[in-house]
Amino acid sequence: MAESRQRNRLPRNLAIGMLVLILFYSLAGFLLLPWWLKRALPDQLEQQMGWQANVDSIRSNPFALSIEALNLSAQDSGNERVVGFDRLYLNLNFFDLIRGVVGFEAIELDEPFIRLDLLEDYSVNFARDVQAASTGQTDQTAEPEEAQTPPPLYLQRFTINGGELLFRDFTQPDMAEFEITPLDLTLTDLATWQREGRSSDYHLLAAMGDQTIEWQGNLSITPLYSSGNLAISGVDHETLGHFLAPYLPYGLLGGKVSVSSNYELQASDTLHLTTNSGRLLVEDLAVALDKQSEQARLNTASIAIEDIGFDLRAREATVGPITLKQPDIALARSKSGEIDWIAALADVAKNQETNSEDNGASSEAPVQAETQQPFRWSFASIDMSDGRVVWQDQQPSSPAELVLEQLSFSVGSVNSEMEDQVPYQMQAVLARGGRLSVNGQLTPQPFALEAAISGSDILLATFEPYLQESANLAIAGGTLGLDGNLDLDGQQEPLTGTFSGTAEVSGLNLQLPGSNERLVSWQALRLSPVEYNVHPARLEIGTVTLAQPGINLVRNTTGVHNLEQVVLPPAADGANTATQESSDEEAQFILRIGQLMIEQGELDYTDRTLEPAFTTSLDQLNGSVIGLSNVAPQQGKVSLNGRIGGSASVEFDGTIGALGTDETSNLKLTMKDLSLPALSPYLGRYLGYGIDSGKLGLDLDYEITGSQINASNRVVMDRLGLGQSIASEEAINAPVKLGLALLRDGNGVIEVNLPVSGDMASPEFNVGQVVMRTFVNLLAKAATSPFSMLGSIADLAGLSGEELGQMRFEPGTTKLAPGEAEKLTALAKALLDRPDLLLNIRGGVSPSADGLVLLRDELTAQDTELTDEIWQEAKGAYLAGERPLAPELLNNLANARASVLEVLLRDTHGVPANQLFLLDPSRNAAVSDTGNIIVVFTLDAR
């Protein structure tokens, strides 16, 4: 019976015990655990982190296996909030625990807060606080453990709602603060053990203002595997600028960046990472050259990169189309030749290298494994539209600015092999005028280029600063047009290639800087076709057509021609070396021009050193030069004609040897009917008289071999008439009128041949000056030795020029000596051919020779036999002055001789009386070796 009662109590005792256990379990779960956690959690945070923490309340449900904590807040040693949340809810799965798995049905975290500080040494505040809290504690170094399989853990659902992450960066001089809120995360069905065909799903959404991060996909812990999509949108320029500041020297003034991509990550023995369908979009980008500048030098409406893919295992990156819209960039080159964008990068690289050396970092690149395959890359295309480029160049003496607008550019597919042909195309408009387009194909390795180049209406004034680096010229007008194909081949050294096409420069007008006077101009210069070979250097032009070329040549009052001012003074350093190198290159250069056509050319010449200034012009110049080359043997042909001074015709023809060689060139110039009064300012300087009338003709024959010239200059002046005298220090000191009268023929024409020879390479040799000096010397000789200029006439009579200037008479008579009549005939012809020439006849007697003859005649006339004794006595008395003759005898004889000559010339030879003048006779005439009396002539001109 006792046993029966005990059996009846056992269920009751078990029930009571179970109730007691449940009571204690409930008390522990509902009261003791929350009480303990509320006190233990702040203590642990203080011990492990040095934080001061506070929790408003913690509730637990032992039957639901859940814990809920409310309003946790922790401050660090600086009394700044570091972590916190409004609510944390944990719910364990009872059945998972039975299976030995720590399983959570739910983990919910509402409005958590984390403050993450990146400190100056690039550590974070959490690591700093852990290290500070562990200082003074017993150092218990944990033994390294072998890698173990993670404990079984399962999360059915993990959520973060309305989180906030405060990130502060102290690594830069100015602290930056970034607040990310809201931060939402959902993670479902996550296990730490391998499950076939099952993985966790996750979704992360974080925002910082308009900047967002969205990350979603699936995740497996064992093995580590994840795939999904990551999208970062609207990251503004301030955020980018802060994080790129240590590596980017430029200042970001505007722009937003968005990035998205699918990815797949797997970690086993090796790490596998692949991405696909990636996209990068940059909008409204504005970049300044430095962080202090507020002026953007680079702007783009958008940059889009599509279809970005990456495979870590295959070491390959692929990029789809790259599109740039409305890029606008300004580049500047300094006086030293540095380009601003590149110079800024060089400064950053130099600073990073210095920092690496200070930190003891090795500059050697890591050695790449021999078995590692090279990295491969490719992109599908690049397309740029509506671009603008501004080039500002400070290196020339005059700053240059070149602006390309409406710039479009496209490039086809390119890969890391660099062996495929890449199509490209570029078009642009120059802001100051002109269009340019280039399209073709490019092979990077080995280098080969095919380009079709076209340009129209390109304003040459844009490039004036670069022209002024080699010539003192200003471009007042002119446009360039070209159309051709360029082919380059770099498969072997040296680079080879050709250019073939046409070119035209229209409306050119070149001036000296600071002057409004035209220097060189033309309506059009056409080159067609043009063939240029890179190596060996060869330029061949079929036809060069120069339409309406004009040159305005001016000699200034200083004596310097304006064309001489075009040449810049040689550089002080390196001039000789540069000259030698250029001469070596020129020796290998081949030039051929099929024909040069000149249409309606014009040359104006002004000499301001004269008073009044001398001006003339050569216009209506037409003709051709055929077969020009610098390769011997070569004989080009010249045929040009034009007009000088508005009326005179000029023709220029001949042959030209190979340029730059010693081959002989024969050139001939013929000019007719140039009005001499137009040359009055120039000739008057040397003659001392203005030119009142006359015409000039030239027949020049030049033979040029190398620098040696041998020229014949036939000068014909028809009816040259002098005007008023001109005061000139350079005028010849001789009777100019007499000289001109001697040079004229019967028709009033002066014809002289002035030969010239010399070395044109000599700086002292000038063809024009030599010709003028020869003519002036000839004129002076004619004026000072007039009868020598009649030498050609005298030669015909077998006489010398000087013999025409005197006549011989038999002593005591008016009878010409033998042979004198022929001289008189020659002299008469010279006078008849030169109507402006005047002959002065000065009769003469010799008191000794003529007096003795007259004395003998007087004695003979006295009807007394003249014995030898009587003659000797009378002769001695006459010579001693003791027996004079009648005074009129000698004077009459002198006058009679002059009259005889006048009559003979006038009546016998027909010399006009107005050319003959009798002078006061000479009473002490010379006696020739044969005893004849010499009567002299002098010449004069009207």
Image (tube, rainbow, N blue to C red):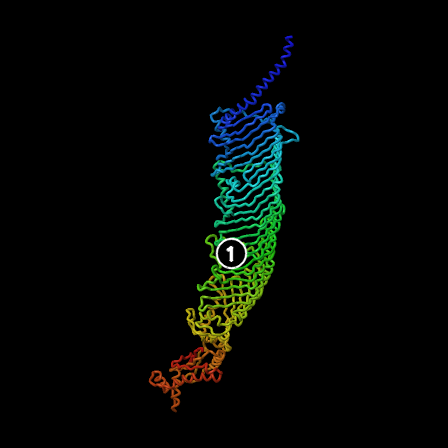
Q: Is residue 765 above or below residue 538?
A: below
Would residue 176 appear left or right of 501 to someone viewing this image? Answer: left
Front residue of 794/333: it is: 333
Would residue 133 appear left or right of 865 to someone viewing this image? Answer: right
Q: Residue furthest bottom?
A: 863
Q: Position of residue 853 (x, y in %)?
A: 40, 85
Front residue of 770/418: it is: 418
Q: Quadrant of the N terminus?
A: top right
Q: Position of residue 657 (x, y in %)?
A: 56, 62
Q: Position of residue 715 (x, y in %)?
A: 51, 71
Q: How many marks?
A: 1
Q: Position of residue 706 (x, y in %)?
A: 53, 61
Q: Is residue 225 visible?
A: no
The image quarter in which residue 161 lies? top right
Label 1: how many Cα within 10 Å (few below 14, some 14–19, many 20+): many
Q: Is residue 427 visible?
A: yes
Q: Which residue carries the number 1 mark?
A: 464
Amino acid type, label 1: Glu
Q: Quadrant of the C terminus?
A: bottom left
Q: Residue furthest left?
A: 882
Front residue of 364/831: it is: 364
- Check disc 1 and report its element: helix, strand or loop: helix
Front residue of 463/870: it is: 463
Q: Residue furthest right?
A: 197
